[in-house]
Structures are given as C-alpha cells and as structure tokens.
C-alpha cells in the first residue's frame, strides 16, 4: 500500500509539478486574462538552453533561472506585470517553476504604443545575424552566425483578436559577435524595427522591477 | 539456466533491433576496406519525413525511412551497395539491412571524389539567404524548410574520411517563381559537394529499384 501511495505521489508530482515549463503557465495566464476581457497583453520571454542566470531572491534564495516570461496587461485602469520562470533551486533541484504576484507598473504608454503599432510589428521581425565571407577568395557567400548557447528572446503582442510573436537571439541585434568579427548585415535594419524598440523598453522595465517581485 | 538463456536472447535481439543505419554503413565500410577497396563515396538520404515504399526481393514491401549508398571499385569493377533503415509490411519498425551490391559504372564519380578530396574537405554548403523585397532590399533572410530532406555525402580514402551535409533547398537558384533569389547559389553550385551530390543522384536513378536482399 505504501509503495502504491509513493508511486502515485511521484506520478502526480511529475505530471503536475516538475515537468511544467514557465512559458506554458504564462500561456494559460494569458488565456485566462483574455477570457476576463483584457484587450492588450504583451509577452516577453528569454531562454538559454542548458544554461541560465544566477539570481538572488528574497523568497527563493540563490537560484539559477533557465527561462522566464513576463506578461504585461491592463485591467481596471491599472497596468500590471507577472513573471513566470523555470529555475534550479539552491539545493540543485532542476525544473522548478514559480509565478510572481501581479505587480503594478507604469507601462500604460508601452501597451498603448504596442497596440497602435501592431501592424508594423507584424511586418518587422528581427532578422538573423548574417555575415559576408569569401571562403575561396573569389565568390561572396552569406552565412548565419548562430552560437551554440545564446539568449533566445521571444516577444508577443496580443491586441483583441490580432496577435504577433517574434523569436530572435541576442546576437541578431549585435553589430558583430567579436571585436574584429565581420559586420552583421542585418544590424542597421534590425535596430530600426518596431520589434527591437519594444524589446528595449521591455528590457528596461523588467530589469528595474526584477528584484522587487514577490513569489 | 532457462532465465539466463532468456536474458541472453533478449539482449541479442535488442542489439539487432537497435542497430543504427550509421553503424551498418560503418561496418560495411570496414568490411570493404579489408577487401582492399581504395576510395568509397557515400551518399545518404535522411528522408525521415517522407519515407519511400520499395519492393525488395528477399524483403518484400518495405517502407524505407533512411538509406545510404556506397560507391566503390572492387577487383576493377564499379559497385554500389545500399544500406536501409526500414519498417516491414507488418508494421514492425527500426530494421536495418545491407542489400546485395550491384555492378555500376561509377568511375567518373570515384575519380572526381579522390581528385577533389582536399577541396571537398574545405567546403561547406551555405544556407539559402535572400533579400527581402518588402522592405526595399534592406534586410537579408534565411529560407528554412522544416520538412525538407537532408543529404550526407562522404568520401573515404585509405587514409582519411570526410562527411558533408547538403540541404537541397540551399542549392536552388530561386524560389516562388523568381520572387526570391538565393544569394549563395553561385558558390554552392560550384562546390565539389554539390557536384558529387548531382553525380551520385544521377547514378542512383538507374539502380535504386534493382537491389535485393539475402542469398541470391
């Protein structure tokens, strides 16, 4: 009997706890907000496969965050954000998830700007980091630079029934990947896109509130 | 004793089923080496997303998920062997078989491969990069097809071996009736990887349905 209870508890924990990813939880929260009539939502996530960021949290201690998703939304005239993350705790247990309590932020203008510019954001994804080379000294070729471990960024804007999502990497927005590395041919284009402008605003807001979040 | 025999049988059967196509090809290359074969050109099609149905004498109707051809010369005669990863008509999956070799005139392929080994080693096929017309050609994009076939081409000489990958979309000049143009086409089509790919494909057309399995 004890064995059966143990197996059941193990299965339950695998199904409902450890195997869950923060982006799935964020997705369910977005669906919930939409069903409650929230019109404009912005999703902003980051992931580094197999790696992560060390963070110090008052509630969780020292943790290594593998992926996170911020969700911005407006309800009853106030703007809030929530953070969903997958992390390893200080004991080394991997695949844990945590959701922050909704936090009031001053991001009304950003939500309005994103809603007004959704058509431009749809048309302007961030393009890959592409470099020019001459492998045989004669012919010009174009190649993609993709490091093995890079920050994967995804941004989603949901306005009523319209929605757009763009995935890109940190390196796509860099001029070159090393001091003497070749120029990213998409750099000038990428940094003038609406998606990149939104990314900069999201980065600034989330960095300023990250340490104040409660889990 | 009975339990031990059962366990051994299970282990033997597991090792047979779990053999990969790559292991089979490697075993075949080692075996050809022992027979004194000098240069081997390998052409592998990893058509996982669009398996091909063949009727092979000795195996019946099979669905091949991956296949690998080996071109070589033995006792002065050009030969080709095919290793397949397949499921049978009973729905059993993950079988690997090495089919009986066939005679083929592959002199030009083997000569080209050994003469261009160094060039082949230093080359790669670059991705399909094109200019976005919608934003006035100011950005470059990468054309990706998630369900595309992917090919591997290998050259094994007595001393060295080298493998290269090739996505057929990367060696196309254009897509969408000329709407988008592959900026890497000129270079990609001048590589020895592409030339060997074309030569091997041409040779395969004439023999791919003629293979058999087991003792003749």
Image (spheres, coloured by chain):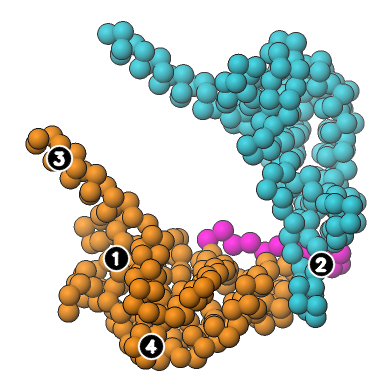
Chain colours: A cyan, B orange
Find numbered disc 1 in the image and state the secondary structure of the residue it sits on. Answer: strand
Query: Was residue B135 drawn as part of the magenta stretch in this picture?
Result: yes
- Toward the top, the furthest residue is A2
Left or right of B77 in this view: B114: right
**Looking at this view, is B82 or B79 the one in front?**
B79
Query: Residue at coordinates 71% horizontally, 78% vertically from top-left?
Result: B187
Q: Nearer the viewer, mark 4 or mark 2?
A: 4
| Mark whose residue sits in front, 1 or 2 | 1
Q: Quadrant of residue A63?
A: top right
Tell me which chain the residue with mark 4 is part of.
B
Q: Residues within 10 Å of mark 1 (few under 14, many from 20)?
A: some
- Residue hosting label 2: A132
Classify mark 4: helix, strand or loop.
strand
Please provide the residue range marked out in magenta.
B134-147
Q: Which mark is residue B78?
A: 4
- Check disc 2 and report its element: helix, strand or loop: strand
Residue B43 in the figure: left or right of residue B178: left
Question: Are the two marked residues, 1 and 2, in contact with CB atoms closer than 8 angstroms?
Answer: no
Is residue B74 at least partly visible in the picture?
A: yes
Which of the image's four quarters has the N terminus of chain A?
A: top left
Dot placed on the residue nearer the N-terminal end, 4 or 3: 3
The alpha-carbon separation of the residues under discs 4 and 2 comes to: 41 Å
Q: Mark 1 belongs to which subunit?
A: B
Left or right of A102? Residue A207 is: right
Q: Work out whether residue A28 can be spotted.
A: no
- Residue at (21, 75) in percent of width and height: B57
Q: Which residue, given by chain and number where applicable, does mark 3 sit on?
A: B6
Cα distance, mark 4 to mark 3? 44 Å
In this rendered view, identify the residue nearer to me: B45 or B101. B101
- Could you give the CA–CA distance between mark 3 and mark 1, rounded to whole angstroms? 25 Å
């Amino acid at each position: 009997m004890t064995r059966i209870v143990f197996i059941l508890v193990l299965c339950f924990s695998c199904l409902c706890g450890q195997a869950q990813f923060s982006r799935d939880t964020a997705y369910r929260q977005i669906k919930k907000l939409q069903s409650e009539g929230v019109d404009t939502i912005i999703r902003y996530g980051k992931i580094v496969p197999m790696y992560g960021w060390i963070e110090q949290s008052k509630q969780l201690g020292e943790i290594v965050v593998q992926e996170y998703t911020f969700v911005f939304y407006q309800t009853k005239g106030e703007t809030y954000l929530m953070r969903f993350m997958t992390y390893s705790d200080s004991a080394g247990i991997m695949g844990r998830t945590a959701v922050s309590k909704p936090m009031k932020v001053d991001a009304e203008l950003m939500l309005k700007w994103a809603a007004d510019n959704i058509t431009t954001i749809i048309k302007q994804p961030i393009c890959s980091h592409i470099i020019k080379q001459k492998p045989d000294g004669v012919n010009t070729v174009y190649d993609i630079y993709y490091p093995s471990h890079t920050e994967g960024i995804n941004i989603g804007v949901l306005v009523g029934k319209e929605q757009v999502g763009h995935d890109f990497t940190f390196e796509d927005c860099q001029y070159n990947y090393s001091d003497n590395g070749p120029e990213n041919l998409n750099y000038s284009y990428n940094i003038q896109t609406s998606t990149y402008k939104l990314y900069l605003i999201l980065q600034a807001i989330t960095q300023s509130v990250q340490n104040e979040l409660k889990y | 004793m009975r339990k031990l025999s059962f366990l051994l049988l299970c282990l033997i059967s597991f090792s047979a089923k779990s053999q990969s196509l790559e292991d089979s090809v490697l075993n075949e290359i080692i075996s050809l080496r022992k027979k004194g074969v000098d240069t081997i050109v390998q052409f592998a099609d990893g058509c996982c997303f669009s398996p091909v149905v063949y009727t092979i004498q000795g195996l019946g109707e099979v669905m091949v998920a991956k296949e690998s051809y080996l071109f070589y010369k033995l006792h002065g005669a050009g030969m080709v062997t095919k290793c397949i990863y397949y499921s049978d008509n009973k729905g059993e999956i993950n079988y690997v078989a090495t089919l009986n070799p066939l005679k083929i005139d592959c002199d030009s392929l083997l000569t080209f491969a050994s003469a261009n080994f160094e060039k082949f080693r230093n080359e790669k096929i670059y991705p399909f990069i094109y200019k976005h017309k919608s934003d006035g050609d100011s950005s470059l994009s990468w054309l990706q097809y998630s369900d595309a076939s992917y090919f591997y081409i290998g050259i094994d000489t007595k001393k060295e071996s080298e493998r290269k990958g090739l996505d057929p979309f990367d060696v196309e000049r254009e897509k969408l009736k000329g709407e988008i143009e592959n900026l890497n086409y000129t270079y990609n089509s001048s590589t020895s990887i592409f030339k060997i790919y074309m030569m091997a494909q041409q040779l395969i057309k004439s023999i791919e349905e003629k293979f058999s399995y087991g003792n003749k």
